[in-house]
């Protein structure tokens, strides 16, 4: 971290009182997350080579980043400026000094996949960052670079500036009249007399990065293209046109409950210059690739958000006394901590399994091989279930703080607000369920998944493993024979069951490194698959509700 960032963070916002608002502030968020290290060792062969970097980033995450996120959320979100001093339309956001300085310092986390590294590296840093507003800016910038890397290599100069934080990117796909139904998009793409593409009738209604982005990916339908999603092409939209004029207008910014660091607004496209990406007939496939990246990022952010609230709770339960003893000694508090721990471990393993699957296939192009569709299946499982975990974990954290947990001045309240967007972003749970059905019925992606799941759970020889395997088999029964309405009615439950069975298998796999994960797998099965209360033996096992301190 450079001196300018240290100065900006120190003297803007709550600075020297942050330690009175948050227990997690000032802590090393990497060293205090023992489960993360086990997960990274399992899914990232090169992890030992990057341990020192993660340790340093974990310290930064617990200090300057944590404080900056709080300050931006509470006191200094982006503000849209429509005109300059000469009355010219600029539609640019004003960032707080803290955000303006911290973002370029965070941009290097985008680089690993494009510098001979891997997605596990990027997402490990994203998990430690977790702040969903700041991470959203990085994610949409990274998605823009991703598409240029794969499908527009001639634009390498733009890609490099995106990766270095000199430019910011965005992904503006949906429109007000359709939302997740991309086929309902009305933006038209027309070739002008000079041979350049221009976009008309565009109303990108929930455009994250509006007023900040220098380049945005956006969908539009070329003249003569068929109706529906398959008629969409993907375009790169510059903020300024070839003559240096504003290329689109930002109507307004949204007043959001959370993710306030990222400006989200409404963008109007009317004659906007754009550059066609790749083959226009493959635009929807490029778009879905971008969504796959962001869904995995959503899963990682969900568990990162949950980890922050869990960390706040770990300190709270040791400092707060009630009814004559520290509250960690009360069985009901231990029970809540146990549920939080079980969900956190299972969700974290599921998220990084999705990362690992994607890392092995991300260079694939249409028409995709079977392994790519297998990775897609994992992205749906992870995106949906981790969002549910984040909502529950952060709600329990607020409750452990009592009335203080509902007060905005304390850090823990924000994490529950932040968690509430994760089931909605990048396709709601309904969309994830429908796309799971599609990838199963059309691509048969469940077949290798079930082969892996069965072989993994068969090796465990526990009643819990057998239960998870039986429920997973039940979840895919009837997919090829039931009528459409019945199938859709049960799709979210199928999605959840498959994700839970996979989480149990993954936790058992981690038990080879740390035996406590077998206990967590058993608890996960009883509570989240069987729907039972957590077994009472967990109250007397500190490995479940207590957390190992760093060496």
Image (tube, rainbow, N blue to C red):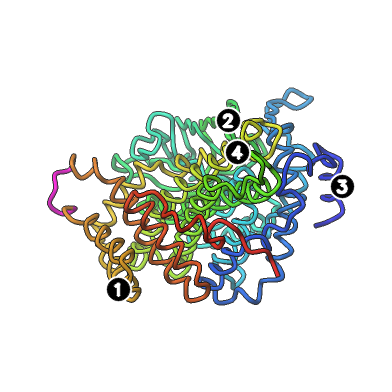
Provide the residue designation for mark 4: 259
**C-alpha distance separating marks 4 and 2:** 7 Å
Left or right: 445 as drawn, with respect to 204: left
**542 or 235: nearer the eye?**
542
Tag of residue 256: 2
Q: Do the residues labelled 2 and 3 touch (CB within 8 Å)?
A: no
Tag 2–tag 1 contact (CB < 8 Å): no
Residue placed under numbered mark 3 in the picture: 7
Residue 407 sits in which quadrant?
top right
**Distance from Cα at disc 2 to Cα at disc 1:** 47 Å
Q: Which of marks 3 and 1 is in front?
A: 1
Evaluate whether residue 479 shows in this view: yes
- Quadrant location, the C terminus: bottom right
The label shown at residue 458 is 1
**Disc number for residue 377:** none
Q: What is the spatial separation of the Cα atoms under label 2 and label 3, in whole angstroms?
A: 29 Å
Chain part drawn in magenta: 479-484
């Amino acid at each position: 971290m450079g001196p300018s960032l240290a100065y900006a963070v120190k003297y803007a916002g709550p600075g020297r009182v942050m330690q009175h608002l948050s227990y997690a502030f000032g802590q090393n968020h990497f060293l205090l997350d023992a489960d993360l290290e086990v997960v990274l060792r399992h899914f990232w062969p090169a992890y030992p080579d990057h341990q020192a970097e993660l340790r340093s980033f974990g310290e930064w995450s617990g200090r300057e980043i944590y404080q900056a996120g709080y300050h931006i959320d509470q006191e200094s979100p982006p503000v849209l400026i429509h005109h300059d001093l000469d009355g010219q339309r600029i539609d640019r956001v004003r960032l707080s000094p803290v955000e303006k300085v911290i973002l370029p310092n965070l941009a290097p986390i985008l680089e690993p996949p494009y510098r001979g590294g891997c997605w596990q590296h990027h997402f490990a840093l994203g998990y430690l960052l977790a702040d969903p507003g700041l991470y959203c800016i990085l994610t949409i910038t990274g998605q823009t670079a991703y598409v240029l890397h794969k499908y527009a290599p001639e634009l390498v100069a733009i890609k490099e500036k995106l990766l270095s934080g000199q430019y910011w990117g965005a992904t503006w796909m949906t429109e007000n009249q359709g939302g997740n139904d991309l086929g309902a998009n009305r933006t038209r793409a027309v070739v002008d007399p000079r041979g350049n593409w221009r976009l008309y009738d565009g109303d990108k209604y929930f455009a994250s990065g509006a007023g900040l982005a220098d380049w945005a990916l956006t969908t539009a339908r070329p003249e003569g293209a068929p109706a529906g999603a398959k008629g969409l092409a993907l375009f790169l939209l510059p903020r300024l046109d070839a003559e240096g004029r504003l290329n689109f207008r930002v109507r307004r910014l949204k007043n959001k409950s959370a993710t306030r660091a990222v400006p989200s607004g409404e963008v109007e496209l009317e004659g906007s210059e754009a550059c066609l990406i790749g083959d226009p007939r493959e635009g929807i496939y490029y778009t879905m690739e971008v969504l796959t990246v962001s869904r995995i990022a959503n899963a990682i952010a969900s568990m990162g958000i949950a980890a922050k609230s869990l960390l706040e709770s770990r300190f709270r339960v040791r400092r707060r006394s009630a009814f004559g003893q520290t509250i960690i000694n009360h069985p009901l508090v231990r029970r809540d901590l146990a549920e939080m721990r079980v969900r956190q471990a299972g969700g974290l393993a599921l998220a990084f399994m999705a990362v690992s699957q994607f890392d092995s296939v991300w260079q694939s192009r249409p028409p995709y091989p079977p392994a790519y569709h297998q990775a897609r299946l994992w992205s749906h499982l992870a995106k949906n279930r981790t969002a549910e975990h984040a909502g529950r974990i952060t709600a329990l954290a607020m409750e452990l703080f009592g009335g203080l947990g509902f007060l905005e001045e304390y850090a823990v309240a924000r994490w529950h607000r932040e968690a509430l967007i994760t089931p909605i972003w990048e396709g709601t749970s309904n969309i994830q369920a429908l796309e799971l059905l599609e990838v199963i019925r059309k691509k048969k992606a469940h077949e290798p998944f079930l082969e892996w799941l069965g072989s993994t759970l068969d090796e465990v020889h526990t009643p819990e493993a057998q239960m998870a395997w039986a429920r997973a088999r039940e979840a895919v029964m009837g997919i090829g024979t039931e009528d459409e309405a019945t199938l859709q009615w049960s799709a979210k439950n199928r999605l959840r069951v498959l994700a839970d069975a996979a989480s149990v298998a993954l936790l058992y796999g981690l038990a080879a490194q740390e035996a406590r994960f077998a206990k967590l797998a058993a608890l996960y099965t009883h509570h989240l698959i069987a729907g039972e209360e957590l077994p009472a033996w967990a109250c007397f096992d500190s490995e479940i509700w207590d957390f190992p301190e760093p060496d």
